[in-house]
Image (cartoon, rainbow, N blue to C red):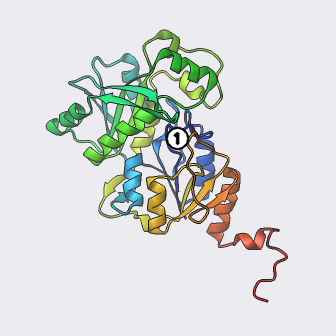
Amino acid sequence: MNTVFIIPTGIGCKIGGHAGDATPAFKLIASISDIAITHPNVVNASDINEMPDNTWYVEGSILDRFLEGKIYLEKPKNNRILLAVNKPIRPETINAVNAARHTIGCEIEIMEMIDLFEMDGYFNSDRSAGGEHYGVTSLIWQIKKHGYDFDALAIATPITVPKEMALHYFRNGGVNPWGGIEAIVSKKIANELNKPVAHAPIENDDPEIKFFNELVNPRIAAEVLSMAYIHCVFKGLHKAPRISDKGLYVSDIDILVTPWECFGRPHKACIRNGVEILGVKENTTCIDESLNEDDAYWVDNYIEAAGWLQSYKKGITRYSISSDYADERVGI
């Protein structure tokens, strides 16, 4: 059984809206799956990434195209990673690259960008995370002009948010203010290069934010523990599937697992292509949009989702194991 597990970025998901805090839920679902496809937001936890071995790590817009039947995904290999950074390269970035080379075992080349690459994060009127970016066109031009030989692109650059906003998030939780613009930029670059892409935010240089050292919500803890923030991206991209004209296709996917309170491009693609959708109601969001019960099954939480998937995998219907239907006499 092949599953896709998504938790959209920047909409305040109760589980998975912070720093890799959906990883345990994803690991549970992946344990039932042959191939478990997810996107960086689910398992990225700054310098931590605990995704299981059967994970296919797929950037959001590539995942959308895959579910729409526009591309195939080729089985993950040992990808050569290009890391794009602003000048000058920070010592912690070089240390992170060397640590990944000698622990993950991946091949990484660093590219200093000619033009400054920056992002600003802010909240939209519906409280979802958004932002603006500068330097994307130059980055794409530089990569194409110099003909870098790589399979996946990592980017480590600053995302600036107002100091008060960052401190409020660390102390009170809520919607992650960095995630929205990261998703926007990653999709733009992945669509242009047609390669796996993931971004790791360098924190503001303000020492009160960069070296924040207070107790935080457990779901945020991975952020305040980290120095370079990029090891999670190296681990994910090292085994990211490549876009191909053969390999895994949308018809090979059995189930999409998603928060119930969201409906967008991947859900529409699954409905069109006959992929079952399982919505988790406990994982609430900040947006006022939900799946329709005519289009999706639902469970209360991820533990129930695991049982639902195990039943689906074994061909056991919910009618046969639910007391709600035990006394019905069907067909009599």
- The residue lying furthest to the right in this view is 327
Toward the viewer: 3 or 322?
A: 322
Toward the viewer: 75 or 331?
A: 331
Left or right side of 116 for 209:
right
Q: Residue at x 37, y 51 (%)?
A: 62
Toward the viewer: 214 or 55?
A: 214
Under circle 1, the secondary element is helix
Quarter the N terminus occupies: bottom right
Depicted 125 relative to depicted 149: above or below: above
Depicted 270 relative to depicted 202: above or below: below
Q: Residue at x 74, y 72 (%)?
A: 319
Q: Quadrant of residue 168?
A: top right
Tally the numbered discs. Answer: 1
Q: Residue at x 55, y 40 (%)?
A: 50
- The residue lying furthest to the bottom in this view is 332
Residue 106 appears anywhere in the view: no
The x, y position of residue 224, in whole percent, is 56, 22
The x, y position of residue 320, in whole percent, is 76, 73
Q: Quadrant of residue 160?
A: top left
Q: Amino acid at mark 1?
A: Val
- The residue lying furthest to the front in this view is 125
- The residue lying furthest to the left in this view is 145
Quarter the C terminus occupies: bottom right
Pointer 1 local density, CA inside 10 Å: few below 14, some 14–19, many at least 20: many
Residue 109 appears anywhere in the view: yes
The x, y position of residue 90, in whole percent, is 35, 17
Question: Mark 1 — residue?
Answer: 43
The x, y position of residue 212, in whole percent, is 55, 15
